[in-house]
Amino acid sequence: MLKVIRGLYKGKSLKRVSDPRVRPMPEKLKEALFHVLEPEVRGARVLDGFAGTGSVGIEALSRGAKFAVFVEEFPAAANVIRRNLDRCGAAERGEVVALEFNRAVIRLGKDGVRFDLVFLDPPYRLLDERDPLKVIWKRDVLAPEGTIVLRRHKKTKFRPRFFAEERTIELGDDALVFYVRESLAGAEARDGAKRRVLRKTRR
């Protein structure tokens, strides 16, 4: 059974989505995530991307986050998130955006919204096709001191631009990777190294 682990909504049961494409974060992995983020959650503005059941964003609200936006393009899952927010009495603290992730972030960027915490739980195969962090950078929706947490398969090779990997937690087949904004010096060093490699290959 899917439940809120701690906080204001502790013990509230959450409805699942009866579709194999939606895979809620296991409880042990969620506990590990919030053990690290506990000091940052209170008062935070949260984006739960590829939200599924909304269990991660709702857990953040339960632990003191100020507000959460849930992005989920699958209509059945978006409806489940709304129902789960209602079950917890948290409907006024959450917004469900039923759009494809990039389109949703573009809209949020136009609205001038910035988030302190961004949770991303995309389908594993998506990371082989594109970088979901790119639109976060381009639309500037992460607060300067904000953190992105990406869930991926631990064997997936994924290196985003513009964000620096801060730490990784592995549990079973899953990895939670924490990213922060890359410093200007770090970005310049990386781009300089790439230019040097290109010059060498042209000789």
Image (spheres, helix red, strand yellow):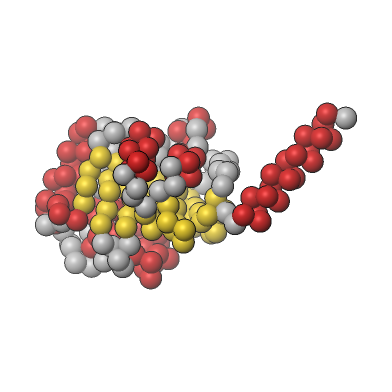
Tell me residue 61's x, y (percent).
25, 60
Please say if 24 is above or below 76.
below
Towards the viewer: 61 or 177? 61
Report which quarter residue 93 is drawn in. bottom left
Residue name at image x 38 percent, y 66 percent? 40
Measuring 35% from the left and 57% from the top, which residue is drawn there? 30
Q: Residue at x 75, y 45 (%)?
A: 193
Residue 62 horizontal/vertical position (percent): 23, 63
- Residue 88 is situated, as x and y percent measured from the top left of the image, at 14, 56
Seen from the viewer's position, the closer of residues 46 and 141 is 141
**Quarter the C terminus occupies:** top right
> Residue 151: horizontal and vertical position, in percent?
43, 47
The residue drawn where x is 33% and y is 62% is 44
134 with respect to 67 (left or right): right
Q: Is residue 200 above or below residue 166?
A: above
| Residue extending furthest toward the bottom | 39
Q: Judge from the rendering whether residue 136 lies leftward or rightward of residue 2; answer left or right.
A: right
